[in-house]
Image (spheres, rainbow, N blue to C red):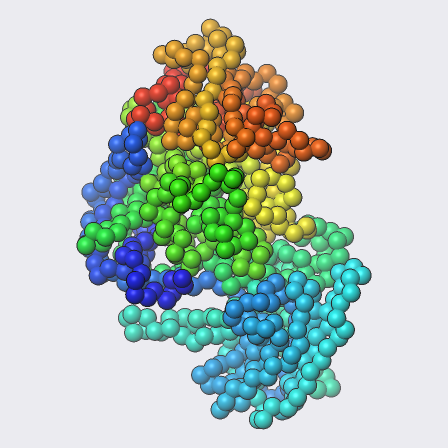
């Protein structure tokens, strides 16, 4: 169902997002809401614990009374996906014999259900300009406007899917000529050059001041609720790549009007006119840059080092960088607000639906004395990478297969799942593929992220995960009265180790999977400075990600050739467009999770987790402070995901970079064959890959004291927090976690 066409029968729904997503005390936050019902009410809270399951601790929030409660009128808002380039003025001459447009194109979706625009200056109101499109049969179509009518010509010329071809259109008087020449990458056979020519009934009006759109055409303006016109709405988006677009006049001495070299300024949202005329443009909705162009020859696979070959942009009709919803109201964070995860809780007045519009508040002062505090890092990069993921959707090419026993109908799901499933307008995650089959590289916080909610139950594992699980750790700190602050991945990226300076101990979320070079380095520098680290998750510090501090809403991930992944990007496209870093696994870059945290990802399974068993090393009298009050040899028998070792798990391994002298205090045993080994741990032949077949599938609890004097304590399991919160923290996972935190605060090592 297209949510733009909200019809009768659409269920009551209220959702929204906060912009910015991460703020400081004193900042203003715009709240943007879509609500099907007539009226809603709202209040602002600090989130403490949001899971509502048997055995869970009490759900808890703390209302921020300084921020007024209120009511608002409901109105439905939808996001408009689709990326394109917008050039406000392309320099049409006052007189010229005609116009030539040439470009390289590589279509990725020839069976698209809608028209796909390659280039357009068309003004459908004045009926002037031209467009070159692909129709739903994959055939090139030229449309021209003569000031009175639009004339549409199906040339019948059909490009090949994922093959480069050069398209050249010449419009001169009433004459229309289109040529298309395919390009071989090596020696593969290609269609012969094709051409089409005809005369239109009336001479087109080509040279009118107006915008040039690449990969979309103007749909005119939209009338807003307040009666004003919105900015130009684009439509008929292209799925594929465009390279080297040139516009020039006809005649014996044609003059170049504009020429675009997309290999310039790749890290930005700008496109550069290299003709010298300065008709630069802007990219909308973050199409993918740093992709191979028409002349890429394999001699260089890193765009930052290439002299040529990266002049293409890959556009998608489902790219979404900014939902651009209207703001319903703005709140101001009190200057006294403490750090944490917050939400504007909205509920329809008729009580039929509610949402927690989540955002994060940084500590007020970075320079405060934090020596008696711990710092919990919210994995905001992970929340972005997973934002609104659609791996459950078997109508998509990259839906996840979760084993023969998995049945999504039987899986535990929270209300957000159903909203996420119907709100297909809210964009994709870095786990999904685009409609044209290419992998998604960017994710944005400028939209509702419906799986970053305090009560979210992850459909694939039937348990809390990411934010909802991380909040269970926060609730534990509250319960134990442990002084704490929270920061986010974004803060570590922006401020480095200074964001962690002075804290006694830094605690990760359950799934800190997507560090950038800067955020990863912040942990190392903090540890070198003597700080204590607690990695209480699994599959952490796994993929390289990238963020531009000037556009912190957008995360980039480039998935490479290895690692547990839902797709691989094409060869030659593994370097991030944002900062020119080599993407893929941190392990592939020699910076595995093991090298700092002592454990690294090894296996995954959706069935229930298993407990840990203590090792002899844990009996060292010098470590007895960690195990005070723990009678059993077995740790973490129960939890929302079964035993404390489950979901994605990590093991100790010197071969993968774990410090030689680190101690393995406990290890998990008994993983079933629903757990499979990580692909990067396999060498030829790929045998003994399941839980009962190898002892390489396990979590290890690892402890060591680093060279800076700070300790590292790691558990290697996403399930840890699911067991921590079981029976309202009355269990030995909570006991061990608390012993370690309190021991660190007391100076123990
Ligand atoms: Fe993950």
- Image position, residue 699 (x, y; %): 52, 25
Using the image, determine if residue 678 lies above or below residue 13.
above
Q: Is residue 206 left or right of residue 487?
A: right
**Quarter residue 151 falls in:** bottom right
Please provide percent x and percent y for residue 508.
44, 31
Q: Nearer the viewer, residue 467 or 564?
A: 564
Point 68% across, 86% down: residue? 197
Pick the front one: 568 or 490:
568
Q: Number of callouts in the render? A: 0
- Does residue 193 appear anywhere in the picture? yes
**Residue placed most toward the observer, 347 or 113:** 113
116 relative to 595, above or below: below
Residue 536 versus residue 302 in the image, above or below = above
The residue shown at (47%, 70%) is 234
Q: Is residue 172 above or below residue 597?
A: below
In the picture as drawn, the residue positioned furthest to the front comes out as 405
Name the residue located 23 percent from the left edge and 52 percent from the top edge.
Answer: 352
- Outermost residue on the top side: it is 621
Q: Is residue 63 left or right of residue 525?
A: left
Visible in this render: residue 533?
Answer: no
Please state the horizontal and vertical placement of residue 105, each as a whole percent of the image: 65, 68
Q: Position of residue 487 (x, y in %)?
A: 40, 36
The residue positioned 52% from the left and 69% from the top of the image is 113
Q: Farthest residue to the right: give it.
A: 187
* Quadrant where the image shows the N terminus: bottom left
């Amino acid at each position: 169902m297209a949510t733009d066409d909200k019809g009768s029968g659409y269920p009551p729904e209220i959702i929204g997002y906060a912009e910015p997503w991460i703020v400081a005390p004193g900042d203003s936050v715009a709240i943007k809401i879509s609500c099907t019902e007539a009226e809603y009410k709202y209040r602002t809270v600090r989130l403490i614990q949001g899971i509502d399951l048997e055995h869970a601790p009490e759900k808890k929030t703390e209302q921020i009374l300084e921020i007024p409660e209120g009511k608002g009128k409901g109105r439905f808002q939808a996001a408009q996906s689709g990326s394109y380039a917008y050039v406000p003025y392309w320099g049409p001459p006052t007189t010229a014999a005609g116009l030539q447009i040439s470009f390289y194109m590589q279509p990725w979706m020839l069976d698209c259900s809608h028209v796909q625009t390659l280039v357009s200056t068309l003004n459908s109101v004045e009926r002037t300009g031209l467009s070159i499109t692909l129709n739903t049969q994959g055939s090139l179509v030229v449309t021209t406007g003569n000031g009175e009518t639009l004339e549409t010509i199906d040339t019948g010329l059909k490009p090949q899917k994922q093959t480069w071809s050069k398209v050249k259109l010449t419009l001169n008087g009433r004459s229309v000529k289109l040529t298309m020449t395919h390009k071989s990458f090596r020696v593969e056979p290609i269609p012969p050059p094709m051409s089409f020519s005809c005369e239109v009934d009336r001479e087109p009006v080509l040279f009118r001041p107006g915008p040039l759109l690449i990969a979309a055409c103007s749909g005119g303006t939209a009338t807003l609720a307040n009666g004003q016109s919105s900015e130009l709405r684009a439509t008929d988006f292209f799925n594929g790549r465009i390279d080297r677009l040139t516009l020039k006049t006809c005649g014996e001495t044609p003059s170049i009007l504009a020429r675009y070299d997309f290999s310039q300024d790749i890290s930005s949202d700008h496109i550069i006119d290299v003709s010298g005329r300065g008709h630069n443009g802007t990219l909308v909705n973050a199409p993918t840059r740093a992709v191979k162009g028409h002349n890429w020859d394999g001699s260089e696979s890193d765009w930052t080092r290439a002299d040529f070959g990266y002049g293409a942009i890959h556009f998608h009709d489902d790219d979404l960088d900014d939902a651009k919803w209207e703001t319903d109201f703005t709140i101001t964070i009190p200057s006294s607000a403490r750090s944490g995860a917050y939400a504007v809780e909205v509920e329809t007045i008729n009580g039929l639906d509610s949402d927690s519009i989540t955002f994060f508040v940084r500590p007020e002062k970075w320079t405060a004395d934090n020596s008696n505090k711990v710092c919990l890092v919210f994995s905001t990069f992970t929340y972005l990478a997973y934002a609104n993921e659609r791996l459950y959707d078997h109508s998509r090419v990259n839906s996840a297969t979760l084993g023969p026993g998995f049945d999504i109908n039987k899986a535990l799901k929270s209300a957000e799942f159903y909203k996420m499933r119907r709100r297909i307008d809210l964009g994709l995650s870095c786990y999904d593929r685009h409609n044209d089959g290419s992998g998604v590289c960017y994710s944005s916080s400028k939209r509702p992220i419906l799986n970053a909610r305090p009560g979210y139950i992850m459909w694939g594992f039937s348990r809390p995960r990411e934010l909802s699980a991380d909040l269970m750790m926060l609730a534990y700190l509250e319960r134990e009265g442990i002084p704490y602050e929270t920061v986010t991945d974004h803060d570590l990226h922006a401020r480095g180790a200074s964001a962690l300076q002075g804290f006694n101990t830094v605690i990760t979320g359950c799934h800190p999977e997507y560090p950038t070079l800067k955020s990863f380095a912040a942990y190392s520098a903090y540890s070198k400075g003597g700080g204590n680290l607690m990695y209480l998750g699994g599959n952490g510090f796994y993929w390289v990600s990238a963020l531009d501090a000037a556009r912190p809403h957008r995360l980039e991930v480039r998935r490479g050739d290895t690692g547990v992944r839902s797709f691989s990007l094409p060869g030659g496209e593994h370097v991030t467009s944002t900062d020119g870093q080599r993407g893929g696994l941190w392990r592939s870059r020699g910076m595995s999770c093991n090298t700092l945290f002592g454990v690294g990802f090894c296996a995954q399974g959706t069935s229930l987790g298993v407990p840990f068993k203590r090792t002899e090393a844990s009996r060292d009298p010098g470590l007895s402070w960690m195990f005070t009050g723990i009678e059993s040899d077995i740790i973490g028998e129960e939890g929302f995901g079964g035993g404390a070792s489950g979901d994605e798990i990590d093991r100790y391994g010197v071969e993968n970079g774990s410090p030689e002298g680190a101690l393995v205090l406990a290890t998990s045993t008994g993983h079933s064959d629903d757990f499979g080994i990580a692909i990067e741990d396999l060498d030829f032949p790929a045998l003994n890959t399941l839980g009962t077949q190898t002892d390489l599938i396990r979590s290890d609890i690892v402890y060591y004291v680093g060279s800076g004097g700070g300790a590292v304590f790691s558990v290697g399991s996403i399930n840890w927090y699911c067991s921590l919160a079981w029976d309202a923290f009355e269990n030995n996972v909570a006991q061990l976690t608390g012993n370690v935190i309190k021991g660190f605060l007391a100076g123990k090592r």
